[in-house]
Every structure is written in C-alpha cells, then in structure tokens.
Image (cartoon, helix red, strand yellow):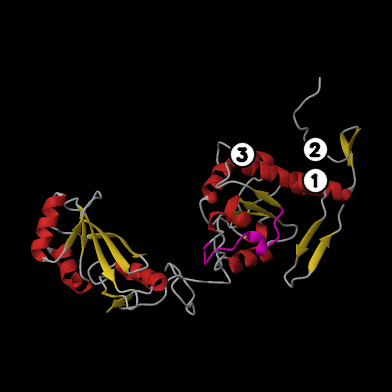
C-alpha cells in the first residue's frame, strides 16, 4: 500500500557495520548540510505580535526543539537562523541589517507573517514601515498569515531544513553589497 | 460619582463646558484657555480626585484638531473624557505634565505626530521620530512620496 505521508529525508550516505561499531560514508557536503539542517538555532528577535506565535512554537505544546531548533540564542554570533517575527519599521531596518551581518555563516532567514513578507496591513498609507524585510536582508522562506499559526511556522522551519538538505544554491549579499553565490550543489 | 453628578459638578466649576451625548463615560468639551483651571480642579478637588491620566491623544478632523484626555480616579472609581478643539493652523494648549507626570512624554508624542504646541512643557522634543523629521505624520493631509504608497 502506498503511503501518502511524506518520507523524511534520510541520512545522506551509508552505514557500514564493522565489528565493534560502524563506519559512515557519504559526500562530505551532503553530510554537512544534513548536520546543519538538524541544528538550527534561532536568534531571539521579534518586533511585534508574530512573536507571540513564535514563542508558542518554541513552548511545550509545539516544541520546535523536536526538529532541531533547540534553543533561542540571545546573540547573533551564536545563531544560525533569524525569524523575522513582526513589522520592520524604517528605524528598525538598520538594526536588522546589523544583526544579520553579525550572524556567522551559514545563516538563514525566515520572514514570518504578512508584515515581514510585504508590509502586510501597513502596505498602504504608512510613512514608517518597510514593505517587506527582503528590502533589507535576503529571505529564504516566507510564511503567510497575520499572524501565522505555530503549525505554519513549523512548516516553514521544516521547509528551510529541506532546502538546506537539498543543498539549494543560495545567493547572498555580503557586507560590501557584493553578491556571493554559494556553489554547493 | 455617577456620570450625571460628574457633569453637574464640573459645569458648576466651569459653566461653558459642552457635554457630548453617548458613550460609556461623560464627554465634555472645554475651551483650550479654560483647560489649566479645569485640570487643576479635576486632579485636586477631593470629590473628583482624578489621579490617573490613562490616555492622552489627539484626533485630526481635517477642519480642526481635537485633544482627548481620558481620566480615571483610583479612589472613587469614576472616569471622564475631556476634549478640546484646537485651531489646525496654530494648535496650542497648556501642558498638563505638572499635574499628571505621565503627560510629559504623551505630549511629546502628540507634538511630533500632530504638531500640537504644548505651552510651558519642560522638554518638548520629538519622541520617536528622528530629530530632523519634517511634517506631522498622523495629520490627514500628510504626504510622504518616498515612504508612502497611497491607496
């Protein structure tokens, strides 16, 4: 019988059993991507009501530690992913850029909710709101909703994991504004 | 005090108050020039004792601006709303931050967003907007061709 459930992506390689243990073999890039995707620590960063859903996703009921998002880091130097949970105003934009620049490579960005995606309810007739966080930093995964439910954020986080595991080519902009192409396939 | 008692009491203190019908709490319009005297009475008269200013804001009606003060008494548990119409070209009203300290930064916010000049305010600077900001963003006729997409 065919299963309709999505199969999780397996370890990219082979386990060769030997007496007293085993040997793992596989392409090193794939193994690194697999490891990275299963340990993505988010930055403690939130600007408005999406933060409540984000905190809920981290708390006991939804518990995103189960998927490797483990624990919020209060410093960008220790964070792998930034979840932009909320409205970005013009005054906040340079702060967001600076936090992103301070994160170590590889780094990933999730735009959570309508505000971070496009300015959302503040798209028209507002003097202060950035119309989408991707005007400031590159975004990997967008989540719709105002705010998105925790299930939607979990889905986005898992989508990001699959993107990393698939070794998708990523385009980034470094501090000087030059485009960096990640050549990993 | 009930709403009727509050309105009666205040109109004896300030006869030219104009009550507005409707609403959960009594709404009274006061002339901007009479506001400092009324504010003193609201705060310090024992049977009124409005010791808590829980909202201070402004509304742009296009023809005029309207200051709105929401007051509450933590002792008597009664509430009141005082409004005051201001001239849109030269909006001026006396500060109340000497009576309710919290008004100090609320008035700064109204100053930067609506351009109301609070007379004798000790520190009338912009609160959140950058210091070099031009214009009053919450006025209905505000235009910002760079940041604003008009519907």
Q: Name the N-terminal-most of marks 2 and 3.
A: 2
Q: Is residue A129 shown left or right of residue B83?
A: right
Main secondary structure type of the part rendered in magenta: loop
Q: Residue at x 66, y 46 (%)?
A: A69
Which residue is identified by label 2?
A: A9
Instruction: Judge by depth and name the residue closer to the eye, A49 or B6.
Output: B6
Residue B47 visible in this rendered orientation of the protein: no
Give left or right: position of A131 versus B59: right
First-in-chain label (1 vs 2): 2
Residue underneath mark 3: A151
Residue at coordinates 61% horizontally, 51% vertically from top-left? Answer: A112
Separation (CA) of disc 2 from disc 3: 20 Å
Residue that mark 1 sits on:
A165
- Residue B49: x and y in percent read 16, 59
Residue A37's place in the image compared with A127, above or below, is: above
Distance from the alpha carbon under mark 1 to that under mark 2? 8 Å
Reply above or below: B1 against A57.
below
Which x, y percent locates residue B19?
18, 58
The residue closer to the viewer here, A58 or A19, is: A58
Pointer 1 and pointer 2: residues touching (CB < 8 Å)? yes
Chain for disc number 3 = A
Quarter of the picture containing the N terminus of chain A is top right
């Amino acid at each position: 019988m065919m299963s309709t459930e999505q199969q999780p992506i397996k370890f990219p390689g082979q386990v060769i059993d030997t007496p007293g243990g085993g040997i793992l073999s596989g392409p090193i890039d794939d193994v690194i991507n697999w490891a990275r995707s299963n340990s993505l620590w988010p930055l403690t960063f939130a600007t408005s009501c999406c933060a409540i859903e984000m905190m809920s996703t981290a708390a006991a009921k939804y518990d995103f530690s189960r998927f490797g998002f483990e624990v919020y880091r209060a410093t960008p130097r220790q964070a792998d992913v930034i979840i932009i949970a909320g409205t970005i105003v013009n005054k906040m934009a340079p702060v967001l850029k600076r936090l992103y620049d301070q994160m170590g490579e590889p780094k990933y960005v999730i735009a959570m909710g309508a505000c971070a995606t496009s300015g959302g309810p503040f798209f028209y007739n507002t003097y202060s709101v950035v119309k989408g966080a991707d005007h400031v930093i590159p975004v990997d995964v967008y989540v719709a909703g105002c705010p998105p439910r925790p299930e939607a954020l979990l889905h986005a986080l898992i989508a990001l994991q699959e993107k990393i595991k698939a070794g998708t080519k990523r385009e980034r902009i470094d501090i000087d504004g030059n485009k960096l192409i990640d050549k990993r396939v | 005090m009930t709403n009727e008692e509050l309105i009666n009491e205040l109109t004896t203190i300030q006869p030219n108050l104009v009550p507005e019908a409707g609403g959960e709490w009594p709404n009274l319009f006061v002339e901007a020039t009479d506001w400092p005297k009324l504010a003193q009475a609201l705060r310090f008269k024992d049977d009124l004792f409005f010791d808590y200013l829980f909202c201070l804001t402004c509304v742009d009606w296009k023809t005029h601006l309207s200051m709105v003060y929401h007051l509450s008494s933590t002792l008597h548990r009664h509430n009141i709303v005082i409004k005051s119409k201001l001239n849109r070209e030269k909006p001026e009203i006396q500060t109340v931050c000497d009576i309710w300290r919290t008004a100090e930064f609320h008035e700064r916010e109204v100053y930067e967003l609506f351009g109301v000049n609070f007379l004798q305010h000790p520190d009338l600077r912009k609160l959140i907007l950058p210091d070099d900001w031009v214009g009053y963003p919450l006025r209905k006729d505000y235009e910002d061709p760079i940041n604003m997409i008009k519907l």
